[in-house]
Image (spheres, grey):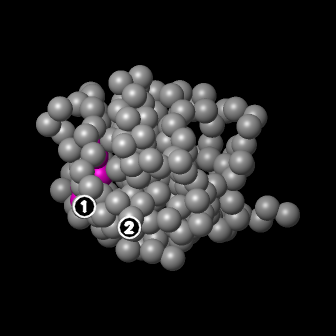
Amino acid sequence: MRNKLRIIGGQWRSRQLPFQDAPGLRPTPARVRETVFNWLQHDIAGRRCLDLYAGSGALGVEAASRGAKQVLQVDNNAQVCRQLHSNKNSLNASQISIVQQDVFRFLGTSEIQPYDVVFLDPPFKQGLAVQTCQWLQQKGWLAADAKIYVEVEKGLSLTGIPENWHQRRQKSAGEVDYYLFDNHADNS
């Protein structure tokens, strides 16, 4: 397998991990991950992170490397999940869990525990980003003041993002636009 990604920071810094060559799978580029984790530098350690459409696992593994207490990676592809398990084992990363399931089926479950940080990088050109954001909010997956990272194809409108989300940051790189939102939910 020639597809490899490099962990940028934390305890596994510079480690390279293989990832599957699956349709639509494109790891978040290293320079984008570096920017995102600079944005989140005070929001990862000791927190619960949810990595939806995990793919290569780059975002979730980076969060675990930087001290996340728990990382749950969700992906529908069996081969991708096998590789995620293999990478978890090679890192001895007990804080990472992997669920092989469709993201909407997962978000529709009743076993909801709110997360502090959510990474959302759906396959491009399938119209999944906004609906996934809505389900995260409506179904109670977000802790109060959660941070939500959203990566989409360049120029995609995020019209329909939950009204209580505040956009903290936005940048573009190559073919992607990426955003960081704060959830300002009243969970009382």
What quarter of the picture does the N terminus occupy?
A: top left
Q: Quadrant of residue 104?
A: top right
Marker count (numbered): 2
Residue 152 image point, x, y percent: 35, 49
Q: Which mark is residue 36?
A: none
Q: Quadrant of the C terminus?
A: bottom right
* Label 1 CA crowd tier, 10 Å (few <14, some 14–19, many 20+): few
Name the residue rendered at 39%, 48% in the picture: 91
**Residue 37: % across, % down:** 39, 68
Please state which of residues 105 and 184 is positioned toward the viewer in this rendering. Answer: 105
Residue 63, given in percent of the width and then of the height, sits at 45, 59
Tell me the residue at 67%/33% (across/down). Answer: 108
Q: Is residue 54 visible?
A: no
The kind of secondary structure element at disc 1 is loop
Q: Check disc 2 and report the residue beneath it.
A: 10
Give the answer, above or below, for where 69 lies relative to 41. Answer: above
What stretch of residues is rendered in magenta?
26-30
Q: Residue furthest bottom?
A: 42
Give x and y (percent) for residue 138: 69, 46
Q: Could one spot residue 75 in this view of the protein?
A: yes
Q: State the SS at label 2.
A: loop
For the residue marked with disc 2, what is the amino acid?
Gly
Give the answer, above or below, for where 96 lies relative to 40. Answer: above
Three-letter amino acid code at disc 1? Ser
Classify 115 as above or below 165.
above
Rendered residue at 51%/76% (across/down) = 42
| Looking at the image, residue 17 lies above or below residue 21 | below
Task: Please indicate whether residue 21 sits to the left or right of residue 38 in the image.
Answer: left
Is label 1 in contact with label 2 (beta carbons under 8 Å)? Answer: no
Mark 1 sits on what residue? 14
